[in-house]
Amino acid sequence: EAFRSDNLPSSGGDDNSVENLAGAHTETFPEHLAAQLRQSQLLKPGSFLRLCLYLTDCLDERGYLTIPLEELAVEQGCSKAEAEQALFALQMLDPPGVGARDLTECLILQLAQGPDFNALTVRMARDGLEALAAKDYAKLSRRFHASEAEIRRAAAVLTALNPIPAAGALDARPAVRAGWRAVRPPIRGWGRSAPGPARGSTGSPRRSLSIGPPWCSTPP
């Protein structure tokens, strides 16, 4: 049947109005990130922007990047340095902590965007999470040569951060949903897809700031 405008539902408060139908699409978390990248005046259309967009589809359901940058660089035919720069651009997006490679880096990325980015909070995020989870403030005080009051203040800062960036975005923006792809984007030059993002890196845990943005490497 030919399209006729009088077939459309009226917009008088009907849940099936044109306005409601137009807004029926639910933005996924990767789309939320991609929109920020495309709107950034610092990123011009081209291969670097495409690499940043590729990384948004490589995040796991928490908003972490668990696939080694070396592997992603090979897949995309770029250098590791270019992959690192793309990751740094991704880590500047909202929500804070997105693109982290482990919990420590996730927390430090959030600290770096707030007023509590200092030597003690960063050191506790790096080397004190186990004791922090056990609320062993005396042990943390001895390890970091700080008073228990200072340790408790730093602990309050860290425990207020969000360990799952994607969940934070979902809470803050009800329209955003975790619409994760079942497989990673196609490897360049291949006609098929690689295994999905649930497969993370193997071996020993990655040190959070072994590779990181310059502003995140040396707390005041």
Image (tube, rainbow, N blue to C red):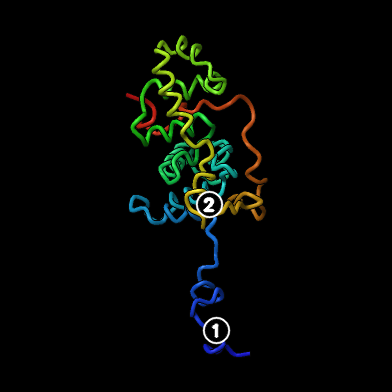
Q: Is residue 87 above or below residue 204?
A: below
Residue type indicated by callout 2: Phe
* Along the line of sight, the residue nearer the viewer: 175 or 138: 138
Where the N terminus falls, by quadrant? bottom right
Please name the residue shown 62% across and 52% down the image: 181
Q: Is residue 220 left or right of residue 143?
A: left
Q: Position of residue 98 (x, y in %)?
A: 48, 41
Q: Is residue 171 left or right of residue 199?
A: left
Q: Is residue 150 above or below residue 190?
A: above
Please name the residue shown 46% across and 33% down the image: 160
Q: How many marks?
A: 2
The mark nearer the N terminus, 1 or 2, is: 1
Determine which residue is flagged by label 1.
8
Please name the residue shown 36% across and 53% down the image: 40
* Along the line of sight, the residue nearer the viewer: 6 or 77: 6
Residue type indicated by callout 1: Leu
